[in-house]
Image: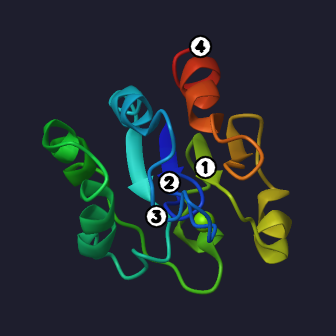
């Protein structure tokens, strides 16, 4: 099972509020719960196969003991649509707060084991806690 991870608005708040740039509650447990999975960046901070920026941003909000977990997340290559970075021959879960129309169109070809979870920290700041409990460690 592959996991694809957005960063802004999914694991780190991006709204211009008191929470701006702060990690979502439950982020540390979420990162630990990803350990059994084959995990990939799917973020504007990593589009050319270079994970440097994604790693830097995530390490800034996580304790050092979790930095090795960040380093093992693999880069993807995509332009325009994040679905270009997804391996549609594998089972996957993609976590993102903002799926574009063109991406939804591509996702129509998914089978039952290929899913996208729309994370909504804006209305549910504890969404990562629920995902860790209900999806990553069912
Ligand atoms: Mg986002």
The spot of residue 13 in percent (x, y) is: 55, 58
Q: Which residue is mark 4?
A: 138
Helix or strand or loop: what does disc 4 sit on? loop
**Mark 1 residue crowding within 10 angstroms, few (<14) / some (14–19) / many (20+):** many
Helix or strand or loop: what does disc 1 sit on? strand
Q: Which quadrant would the C terminus be assigned to in this image? A: top right
Of discs 3 and 1, which sits in the foreground? Answer: 3
The spot of residue 80 in percent (x, y) is: 63, 86
- Whichever of callouts 3 and 1 sits on the residue coming sooner in the sequence is 3
- Whichever of callouts 1 and 4 sits on the residue coming sooner in the sequence is 1
Answer left or right for 114 relative to 39: right
In this rendering, is residue 41 above or below 78?
A: above
Q: Which residue is mark 2?
A: 5
Q: Relative to the observer, which residue lies in front, 31 or 127? A: 127
Instruction: Name the quarter showing ligand 1.
Output: bottom right
Q: Relative to the observer, which residue lies in front, 75 or 122? A: 122
- Whichever of callouts 3 and 4 sits on the residue coming sooner in the sequence is 3
Query: What numbered label is drawn on residue 70?
Result: none
Helix or strand or loop: what does disc 3 sit on? loop
Which quarter of the picture shows residue 56?
bottom left
CB atoms at circles 3 and 2 under 8 Å apart? no
Q: Residue furthest front?
A: 18
- Whichever of callouts 3 and 2 sits on the residue coming sooner in the sequence is 2
**Mark 3 residue crowding within 10 angstroms, few (<14) / some (14–19) / many (20+):** some
Of discs 3 and 4, which sits in the foreground? Answer: 3
Query: What numbered label is drawn on residue 95?
Result: 1
CB atoms at circles 3 and 4 under 8 Å apart? no
Q: CA distance from mark 3 to mark 1?
A: 18 Å
Query: What numbered label is drawn on residue 21?
Result: 3
The spot of residue 77 in percent (x, y) is: 43, 76
Q: Relative to the observer, which residue lies in front, 109 or 132? A: 132
Q: CA distance from mark 4 to mark 2?
A: 19 Å
């Amino acid at each position: 099972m592959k996991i694809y991870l957005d960063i802004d608005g999914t694991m780190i708040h991006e709204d211009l509020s008191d929470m701006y740039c702060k990690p979502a509650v439950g982020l540390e447990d979420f990162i630990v719960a990803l350990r059994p999975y084959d995990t990939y960046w799917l973020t504007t901070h990593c589009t050319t196969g270079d994970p440097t920026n994604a790693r830097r941003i995530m390490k800034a909000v996580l304790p050092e003991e979790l930095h090795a977990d960040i380093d093992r997340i693999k880069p993807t290559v995509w332009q325009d649509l994040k679905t270009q970075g997804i391996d549609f021959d594998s089972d996957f879960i993609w976590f993102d707060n903002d799926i574009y129309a063109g991406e939804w169109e591509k996702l129509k070809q998914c089978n039952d084991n290929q899913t996208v979870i729309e994370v909504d920290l804006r209305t549910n700041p504890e969404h990562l806690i629920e995902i860790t409990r209900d999806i990553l460690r069912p």
